Image: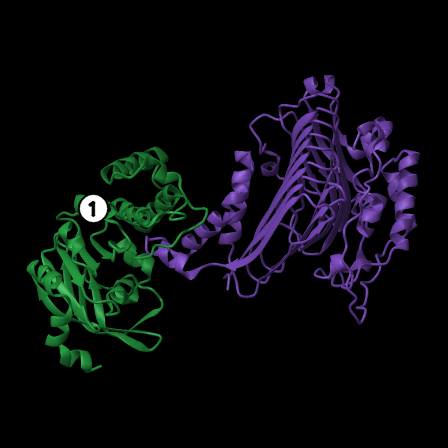
Chain colours: A green, B purple
């Protein structure tokens, strides 16, 4: 059975200010979707809301994942169900090494499935981590560094993708994974995502720019404007945006934009 | 300056900044003991005459000094009034209460797997005392204080009080007057003790007073782990102690001090180290027990090129109040000190850290560092962090830092988004917070013990909020 993330008519407010005004979206395992749109349109709000950040208040609508209502679940429960968010701005956790962090995360997941689980053995974990780091061309000393502390923008994003690879989610949301990356870092990160993409993972790539989509090829492209998805189409929609910018979308949906 | 042959009492007294506040708060009630108790104790402990004489002198000093109040700078944040001073009884004289043996878990070595010696003192009585024959042959003395006072009188007399003069504080005098158990460690010149030494002093019952005297003669080295513990009890208890560390020229002392007193114990300690020329002191503190702790810890860098590091770990819960008052005295040129104290607090607990780096006139090329970091895990816990510098020389480098922070909700959310339930996410952040202290402790067994303390403190029932 394929897992699916279904967002139905989602309304979200932050500090009583409505940001999302009825978003509907269906992402299935094995699919790659791109969500594009101008800044401040609600893309990151959608990402945080999917993961269950407490600052985002869902005022209407539903998020269903594998048939379960996600709004009833805390962030950790959503994660253990198979949802993953690559953060636009990952926080640094002082004193916690990447390896220690990943092992704790894996063990939390194993214990949730089986409370008697003793956790992954250290040799098994090391072997697994090494293979994922090789796959993503991450230098080996990464594992011993404190998570995101003193990481460059590119390193932070690579650390996110390493987590993605290690935790093997069924649906991954990548929030502006391309932001702050130079072209080389962008290519490395995108190659990492592509290496992980397959029939077992569905991906929602959130991006402002089309350039990431030169490397990660979506089947479906959505355009968000003022808290709603206003256009959905194939890969050519992204190319269209690249040529003409967002103005034509604004003009076409002027009514919606003014109706706030 | 420090030459063990001619060691004198410290030249510099504690730096105390006094600001007048009024009105004068009421002093705590006086302790319900008299000189008769001192006499009875000296008799019961079979003191040599000279030691009894010192007890009387200390008692005199104690009774002549007023009880500290909240107006005394050192006691501004630690209120002694709630303790029932008039109900204090000497447990050492109360022989009928046969105490439980010290739990076996506490007797396990924390450094390596083999120890050079272990001394266990329970309620003032020696429960076991072992020292490897090889160390005995080399002249190492590791025994309880009463035995040392009887058998090694001249050595004990030569060094006792040379680090902590009784004028350091009223409770130092009390501890000397009423001492009922303690440890004496002496490592002779150039003797390198490779296997660590371990002492456990348990202080069950109403009150106990202990002292520790550690002397490393010139060129000696040792790793020494000392634990002060007591079982949890329903009634409150008192413990006061003196800890003296004397590190001779070119000597090297690694000292791990663990405090796991029951949550009803009131604990007041005066601790001070003298570090000689080109000597090294690596001092690790771990405070997880007691209801109230007031700890004065001080290092005197007395010889050029001496080096001292102090690493403190504390974790307070419930109504615990842990007050650490540290001072780093750079008494001569070219000395280095490095202090880091880190603590976490939950429930209604409170911590105080007050630190001072003192640089004596002419102590050029001093390199002094002090930092205190606190992580407050609940809205009702509180941490006070007060660094201080008193610099009388002009060519020095002294830096300090003090922070009080809370769990960052963005950190917790990030970790939860990777599948960790909130308690595990919080524990990982706390582990990370303490990591810089763990990195400074060169003994995996001690690190494991501290990590276990964190785990226990984080998991104990009762919400952190």
Residue B313 appears in view: no
Can you say whether A119 is above or below A204 in the image?
A: above
Q: Is residue A108 visible?
A: yes
- Residue found farthest to the bottom: A259
- Place residue B189 in its image quadrant: top right
Task: Describe residue B94's horizontal placement relative to residue B78 as left or right.
Answer: right
Q: Nearer the viewer, residue B23 or B347?
A: B23
Residue shown at 41% from the left, 52% from the top: B424
From the viewer's perspective, is residue A114 above or below residue A3? Answer: above
| Residue annotated with mark 1 | A187
* Residue A43 placement: quadrant: bottom left
Q: Would residue B243 be found to the left or right of residue A39 on screen?
A: right
The one nearer the camera, A34 or B336, is B336
The quadrant in which residue B2 appears is: top right
- Secondary element under disc 1, as helix, strand or loop, is helix
Residue at 19 percent of width and 44 percent of height:
A191
Residue B3 percent coordinates (x, y): 80, 29
Dividing the image into 4 quarters, which one contains the N terminus of chain B?
top right
Q: Position of residue B390 (x, y in %)?
A: 72, 51
Horizontally, residue B437 falls left or right of residue B135, namely left
Question: Where in the figure is residue B100, as x and y percent of width and height?
Answer: 68, 42
On screen, residue B352 versus residue A23, left or right, reads right
Q: Point out residue A245 in the picture as x, y percentages from the top left corner.
A: 14, 66
Label 1: chain letter = A
The residue located at (10%, 62%) in the rendering is A243
């Amino acid at each position: 059975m394929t897992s699916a993330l279904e967002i139905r008519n989602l309304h979200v407010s932050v500090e009583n200010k409505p940001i999302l005004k009825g978003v509907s979206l269906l992402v299935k395992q094995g699919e790659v979707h791109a969500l594009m749109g101008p800044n401040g349109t609600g893309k990151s709000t959608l990402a945080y809301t999917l993961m269950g950040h407490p600052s985002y208040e869902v005022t209407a609508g539903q998020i269903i994942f594998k048939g379960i209502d996600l709004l009833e679940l805390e962030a950790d429960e959503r994660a253990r169900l198979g949802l993953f968010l690559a953060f636009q701005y990952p926080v640094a956790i002082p004193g916690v090494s990447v390896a220690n962090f990943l092992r704790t995360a894996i063990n939390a997941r194993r214990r949730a499935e089986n409370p008697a689980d003793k956790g992954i053995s250290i040799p098994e974990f090391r072997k697994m981590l090494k293979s994922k780091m090789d796959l993503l061309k991450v230098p080996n000393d990464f594992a011993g560094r404190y998570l995101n502390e003193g990481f460059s923008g590119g390193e932070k994003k690579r650390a996110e993708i390493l987590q993605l690879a290690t935790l093997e989610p069924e649906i991954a949301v990548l929030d502006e994974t391309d932001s702050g990356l130079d072209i080389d870092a962008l290519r490395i990160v995108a190659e990492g995502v592509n290496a992980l993409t397959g029939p077992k993972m569905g991906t929602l790539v959130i991006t402002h720019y089309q350039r990431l989509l030169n490397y990660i090829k979506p089947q479906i492209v959505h355009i968000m404007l003022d808290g709603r998805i206003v256009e959905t189409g194939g890969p050519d929609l992204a190319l269209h945006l690249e040529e003409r910018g967002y103005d034509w979308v604004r003009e076409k949906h002027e009514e919606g934009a003014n109706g706030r | 300056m420090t030459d063990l042959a001619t060691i004198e009492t410290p030249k510099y007294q504690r730096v105390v900044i006094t600001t007048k506040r009024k009105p004068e708060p009421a002093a705590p009630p006086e302790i319900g003991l008299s000189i008769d108790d001192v006499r009875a104790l000296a008799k019961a402990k079979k003191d040599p005459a000279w030691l009894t004489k010192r007890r009387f002198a200390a008692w005199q000093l104690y009774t002549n000094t007023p009880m500290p109040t909240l107006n005394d700078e050192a006691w501004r944040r630690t209120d002694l009034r709630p303790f029932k001073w008039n109900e204090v009884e000497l447990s050492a004289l109360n022989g009928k209460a046969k105490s439980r043996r010290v739990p076996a878990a506490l007797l396990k070595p924390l450094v390596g797997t083999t120890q050079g010696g272990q001394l266990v003192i329970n309620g003032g009585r020696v429960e076991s005392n072992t020292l490897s024959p090889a160390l005995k042959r080399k002249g190492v003395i590791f025994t309880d204080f009463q035995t040392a006072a009887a058998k090694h009188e001249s050595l004990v007399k030569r060094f006792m009080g040379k680090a902590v003069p009784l004028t350091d504080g009223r409770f130092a005098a009390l501890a000397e007057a009423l001492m009922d158990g303690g440890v004496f460690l002496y490592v002779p010149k150039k003797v390198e003790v490779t296997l660590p030494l371990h002492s456990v002093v348990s202080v069950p019952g109403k009150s106990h007073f202990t002292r520790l005297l550690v002397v490393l003669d010139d060129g000696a080295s040792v790793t020494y782990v000392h634990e002060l513990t007591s079982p949890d009890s329903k009634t409150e208890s008192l413990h006061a102690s003196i800890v003296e560390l004397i590190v001779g020229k070119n000597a090297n002392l690694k000292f791990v001090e663990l405090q796991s007193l029951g949550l009803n114990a009131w604990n007041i300690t005066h601790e001070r180290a003298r570090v000689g020329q080109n000597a090294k002191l690596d001092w690790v503190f771990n405070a997880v027990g007691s209801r109230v702790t007031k700890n004065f810890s001080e290092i005197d860098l007395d010889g050029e090129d001496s080096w001292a590091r102090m690493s403190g770990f504390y974790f307070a819960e419930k109504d615990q109040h842990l007050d650490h008052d540290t001072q780093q005295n750079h008494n001569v040129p070219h000395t280095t000190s490095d202090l880091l104290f880190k603590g976490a607090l939950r429930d209604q607990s409170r911590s105080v850290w007050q630190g001072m780096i003192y640089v004596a006139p002419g102590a050029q090329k001093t390199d002094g560092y002090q930092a205190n970091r606190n992580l407050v895990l609940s809205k009702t816990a509180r941490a006070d962090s007060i660094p201080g510098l008193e610099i009388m020389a002009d060519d020095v480098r002294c830096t300090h830092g003090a922070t009080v922070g809370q769990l960052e909700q963005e950190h917790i959310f990030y970790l939860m988004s990777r599948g960790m339930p909130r308690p595990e996410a919080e524990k990982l952040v706390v582990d990370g917070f303490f990591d810089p202290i763990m990195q400074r402790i060169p003994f995996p067994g001690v690190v494991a013990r501290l990590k276990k303390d964190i785990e226990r403190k984080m998991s104990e029932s009762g919400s952190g909020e």
